[in-house]
Image: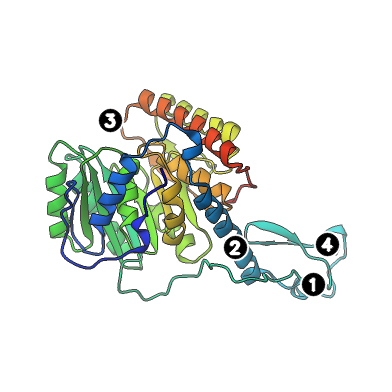
């Protein structure tokens, strides 16, 4: 079944909506909850046992074309003419073998620039990763906090997050609490926070699944930058602005936090450390990925990229992140990595074994899907 139309490009004004499926939003009406719920319901009903039906080949081709155009335009906008490179060397600069054939890194790859031969500009118009204007009335960042039975941590951590953004983030923002079928008091607390804090909205889904919650929140948002982080705030909030800055400036399409970079500071037990490193090593081997940490709950994406990626992502739970990143990288979109400070939550309710098995099934499915569609691994577009 072809993926239902994603609602990322639509906007509907009005009061908070109650959809017949049970999804309910409290807060700014910009979040198109009704369309998000329809999209989630359609995705839930899809049958994905047939690998050839896992990804719409037409949508995948459009995504690859989008990524290629993105890189071409970025290179055309940022390439330094060869004569400028020669001027930078100065008249007295030694002419060793490095100077005779200087290389200029532009965008996602290296262009060899020889004296007197400037790189050719792009011949066709392409979508730009333009910097966002400095003055915005509407939220620039929509930060989603997916939750399931988090009545204990939800209120103090959302208030802490809001205070941090209010004091440090220079653009308008919104925090969206995406409750996916909690059975405790989470929904009640989320609704109260949405009424108490102007920059907070809540979205309740009747079906469990972190990926499903992210899809619904992102699909219904019109913010130029979409992000999410885990409600336990395991990731240090000081990394939030560095995470979204490359997207606001137009430098990158996606950004992820990584706990496996040399600059990261991580406090967690040996069991989770081994599982995380083994999983990411398996990803490198099985899917030839270039990003270092697929599972860190700290990611952001520009909306125009999300609108093309979300209809192709099939997983609705924990593998959602990995699938999104693999598809983005295969399309050649630029992924920025930010080393984070990360402290493991000892009270985490995530079932490690069940999640690991689901991830292994997801990797196997992605291998079949990409083989069926003929999508080959591209040179990694990850930046540090």
- The part of the image, by quadrant, that contains residue 187 is top left
Cα distance in 3D space between marks 3 and 1: 58 Å
Q: Nearer the viewer, residue 234 or 28?
A: 28
- The part of the image, by quadrant, that contains residue 212 is top left
Q: Is residue 57 shown above or below 11?
A: above
Q: Work out whether mark 1 precedes mark 2 in sequence or the reverse, and give the earlier one.
A: 2
Residue at left offset 20%, top offset 42%: 206
Report whether 180 appears left or right of 287: left
Report whether 187 appears left or right of 61: left
Q: Work out whether mark 2 precedes mark 4 in sequence or the reverse, and give the earlier one.
A: 2
| Label 3 close to label 2 by CB (< 8 Å) | no
Eye-nearest disc, 3 or 1: 3
Image coords of residue 301 (percent x, y): 43, 55
Q: Is residue 275 shown above or below 229?
A: above
Image coords of residue 321 (percent x, y): 43, 42
Eye-nearest disc, 2 or 4: 2
The residue that mark 4 highlights is 101
The residue that mark 3 highlights is 349
For the residue labelled by badge 3, is the local secondary structure a helix, a strand or a loop? Answer: loop
């Amino acid at each position: 079944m072809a993926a239902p139309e994603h609602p990322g490009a639509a906007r509907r004004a009005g009061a908070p909506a109650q959809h017949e499926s049970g999804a309910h939003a409290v807060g700014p009406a910009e979040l198109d909850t009704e369309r998000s719920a329809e999209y989630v319901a359609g995705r839930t009903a899809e049958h994905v046992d047939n690998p050839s039906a896992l990804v719409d080949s037409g949508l995948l081709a459009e995504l690859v074309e989008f990524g290629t155009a993105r890189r071409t335009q970025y290179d055309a906008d940022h390439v330094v003419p060869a004569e400028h490179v020669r001027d930078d060397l100065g008249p007295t600069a030694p002419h060793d073998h490095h100077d005779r054939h200087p290389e200029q890194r532009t965008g996602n790859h290296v262009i060899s620039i020889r004296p007197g031969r400037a790189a050719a500009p792009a011949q066709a118009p392409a979508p730009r990763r333009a910097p966002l204007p400095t003055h915005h009335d509407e939220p620039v960042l929509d930060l989603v906090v997916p939750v399931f039975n988090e009545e204990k941590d939800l209120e103090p951590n959302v208030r802490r997050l809001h205070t941090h953004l209010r004091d440090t983030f220079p653009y308008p923002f919104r925090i969206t609490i995406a409750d996916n079928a909690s059975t405790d008091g989470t929904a009640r607390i989320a609704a109260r926070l949405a009424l108490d804090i102007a920059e907070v909205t809540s979205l309740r889904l009747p079906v469990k699944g972190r990926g499903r919650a992210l899809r619904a929140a992102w699909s219904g948002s019109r913010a130029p930058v979409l992000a999410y982080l885990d409600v336990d705030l395991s990731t240090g909030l000081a990394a939030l602005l560095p995470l979204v800055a490359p997207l606001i400036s137009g430098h990158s399409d996606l950004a992820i936090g990584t706990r496996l970079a040399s600059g990261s500071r991580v406090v967690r037990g040996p069991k989770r450390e081994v599982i995380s490193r083994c999983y990411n090593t398996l990803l490198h081997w099985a899917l030839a990925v270039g990003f270092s940490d697929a599972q860190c709950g700290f990611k952001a994406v520009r909306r125009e990229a999300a609108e093309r990626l979300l209809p192709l992502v099939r997983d609705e739970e924990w593998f959602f992140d990995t699938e999104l990143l693999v598809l983005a990288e295969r399309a050649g979109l630029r992924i920025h990595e930010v080393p984070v400070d990360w402290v493991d939550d000892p009270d985490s309710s995530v079932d490690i074994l069940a999640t690991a098995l689901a991830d292994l099934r997801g990797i196997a499915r992605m291998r079949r899907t990409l083989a069926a569609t003929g999508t080959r691994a591209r040179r990694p577009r990850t930046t540090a």
